[in-house]
Image (cartoon, rainbow, N blue to C red):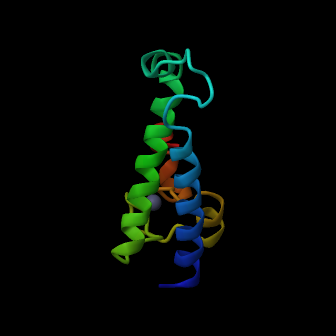
């Protein structure tokens, strides 16, 4: 595993853990029910769910040795971009063509 992969993996695992921590009803409020919580936070949950999927996909690419290549053109993502956005699927040029993914 290269240094940038090890770094990205560390960042991704930490983000994944902090995102997962927000899953579930708030503690210490006996009146809070799971269904109320879910209804109130649904838009946030959707964002978190997508981010978790992106993080998992990036971790899979690291594990399979495909990390750092653009999913669209196959070109290198560039160190700066990977540092700024470890879960990015596309290089800067291609992400312009897919504004919805970022
Ligand atoms: Zn690309």
Count of picture labels: 0
Task: Give the image quarter of residue 79.
Answer: bottom right
16 to 22, vertically: above or below: below
Percent x, y for residue 69?
Answer: 43, 69
Task: Give the image quarter of residue 12.
Answer: bottom right
**Front-most of 24 and 92?**
24
Percent x, y for residue 84?
Answer: 66, 59
**Front-most of 45 and 81?**
45
Percent x, y for residue 57?
Answer: 38, 57
What residue is at 48 percent from the left and 31 percent from the top? 45
27 to 14, vertically: above or below: above
What residue is at 47 percent from the left and 37 percent from the top? 100
Percent x, y for residue 77?
Answer: 52, 67
Q: Of all residues shown, which one is farthest toward the left?
A: 64
Q: In which quarter of the image is ligand 1?
A: bottom left
43 to 90, vertically: above or below: above
- Note whether residue 74 is visible: no
85 to 26, vertically: above or below: below
**Front-most of 59 and 37?**
37
What residue is at 37 percent from the left and 74 percent from the top? 63
Q: In this view, does 102 lie to the left or right of 34?
A: right
- Note whether residue 65 is visible: yes
What residue is at 47 percent from the left and 53 percent from the top? 94
């Amino acid at each position: 595993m290269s240094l940038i992969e090890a770094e990205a993996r560390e960042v991704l695992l930490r983000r994944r853990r902090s995102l997962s921590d927000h899953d579930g009803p708030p503690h210490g409020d006996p009146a809070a029910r799971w269904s109320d919580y879910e209804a109130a936070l649904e838009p946030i949950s959707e964002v978190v769910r997508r981010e978790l999927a992106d993080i998992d996909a990036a971790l899979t690419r690291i594990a399979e040795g495909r990390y750092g290549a653009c999913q669209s053109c196959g070109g290198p993502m560039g160190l700066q971009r990977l540092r700024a956005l470890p879960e990015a699927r596309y290089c800067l040029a291609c992400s312009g063509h897919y504004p919805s993914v970022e």
